[in-house]
Image: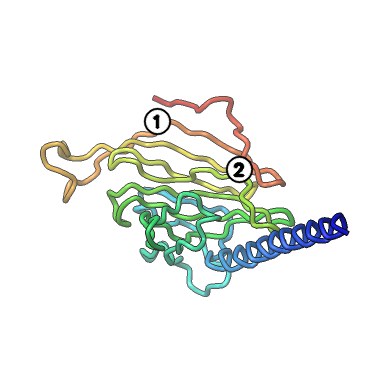
Amino acid sequence: MKRNVFFIAFGLVIMIVGGAAISKNLNKKQDFQKFKEGFDKYNLPFSISDKDTFKVSNNTLLHSDTTKTRLELGYWGSEIYGSYKEFIPELKVSSFSREVTSNCAYVANLYQNTNFTALCYLVSNGFYDSLGEKHFIIATYNNVSGNRIDKLEFAGQTTPEKYTDGLFAKDNTVTVSSYTKKFKNDPKTTGYDNNSVVARELTGSTSYKLDENGHFGKIDATTVSVK
């Protein structure tokens, strides 16, 4: 009798744990679909360049009648809330509340096949201005589970002098190019306000191929330096 009770109790525990796991996975799938809806769909090629203060160039929203995108109009997109942290590990949330301590914003839904979706979002450790640190990330996600497959830093700026441009071509080749900026006056003495950029130097370029399973593979054996 005791043995039967044990097996019945054990079976109930398995059912509860299994049911909780199924419910969690279902909720994640539903959350991922809501998360994905925040990204506007763009045609390829897609590029982000510092020359336009990181506004998207030569891209058109698939569902829009206008020839200018939100980013070209100076709008990064809506802020991504802390409830989507499971899809964006870079999204830092205070341990004492749901307050977000790093800024993240929707940028673009770039590509989708039967296996995965490629989404671009912005991570900024400061304000969305021309000098603040910012990182444009392309991440791929499984269409069914919402699990992240791979990610690539597509464009961004770590300092006011150094930045990267990104180009996502129609053949799913992604090229990331690094540059340094030269200012008219020495920023150490005059600062950056009203200090125009007089030259940009390409310091390196690396290309990647996005495969049918959502992984970025480096095409070049090493980063090509043009110094």
Residue 67, above or below 90: below
Q: Nearer the viewer, residue 176 or 32?
A: 32
Residue assigned mark 1: 203
- Image quadrant of residue 146? bottom right
* Residue 192, percent from left and from top: 19, 46
Residue 195 vertical placement versus 178 (above, below): below
Circle 2 SS class: strand
Identify which residue, 35 or 62, lies in the foreground.
35
Residue 190 relative to residue 47: left or right: left
Marks 1 and 2 sit apart, C-alpha to C-alpha, by: 20 Å
The residue furthest left is 189
In this rendering, would 32 be left or right of 182?
right
Residue receiving disc 2? 173
> Where 86 falls versus 191 (above or below)?
below
Q: Are there few (<14), some (14-19), or many (20+) residues within 10 Å of tag 2?
A: some
Label 1, secondary structure: give it: strand
Q: Nearer the viewer, residue 130 or 19?
A: 19
Nearer-N-terminus badge (1/2): 2
Q: Residue at x 58, y 48 (%)?
A: 169
Horizontal side, residue 100 vs residue 208: left or right: left
